[in-house]
Image (cartoon, grey):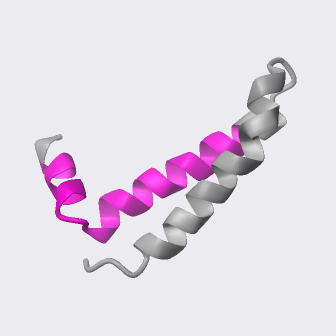
């Protein structure tokens, strides 16, 4: 686990892509759930942030 956080601090592609992918997945789950209106309301923003983050992070070094 320490290696994961160390790679995050050194701006390595792998861990940051994982964070961006998790954000995208959370946004999609928020979009599909029928219970909380606040989650549905912010689902697009969360998905968009994850997508833009993934595009930016894909330029980080390995």
Where is 9 relative to 43, above or below? Answer: below
Count of number-bearing discs: 0
Left or right, 51 with reference to 3: right
Quarter location, residue 2 = top left
Query: Could you tell me which quadrant the C terminus lies in?
Result: bottom left
Up/down of 31 relative to 19, above or below: above
Residue 54: x and y in percent read 51, 67
Q: Is residue 9 magenta?
A: yes
Residue 19 appears left or right of 28? left
* In this rendering, position of residue 9 left or right of residue 41: left
In x, y percent, where is residue 60? 32, 77
Q: Which residue occupies 74% across, 41% down? A: 43
Q: Which residues are magenta?
A: 3-29
Q: In the figure, 41 relative to 20: above or below?
A: above
The x, y position of residue 22, in whole percent, is: 52, 47
24 in the magenta segment: yes
Which residue is pictured at 47% across the width and 74% down the height? Answer: 56
**Residue shown at the point (80%, 39%) measured from the top left:** 31
- In the rendering, at what x and y percent does residue 7 appear? 19, 58
Where is the N terminus found, in terms of image quarters?
A: top left
For image coordinates 32% across by 65% down, the residue present is: 14
22 or 51, nearer to the observer? 51
Classified by dominant secondary structure, the portion drawn in magenta counts as helix
């Amino acid at each position: 686990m320490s290696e994961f956080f160390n790679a995050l601090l050194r701006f390595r592609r792998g861990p940051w892509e994982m964070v961006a992918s998790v954000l995208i997945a959370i946004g999609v789950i928020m979009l599909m759930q029928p219970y909380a209106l606040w989650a549905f309301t912010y689902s697009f923003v969360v998905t968009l942030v994850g997508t833009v983050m993934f595009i930016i992070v894909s330029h980080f070094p390995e």
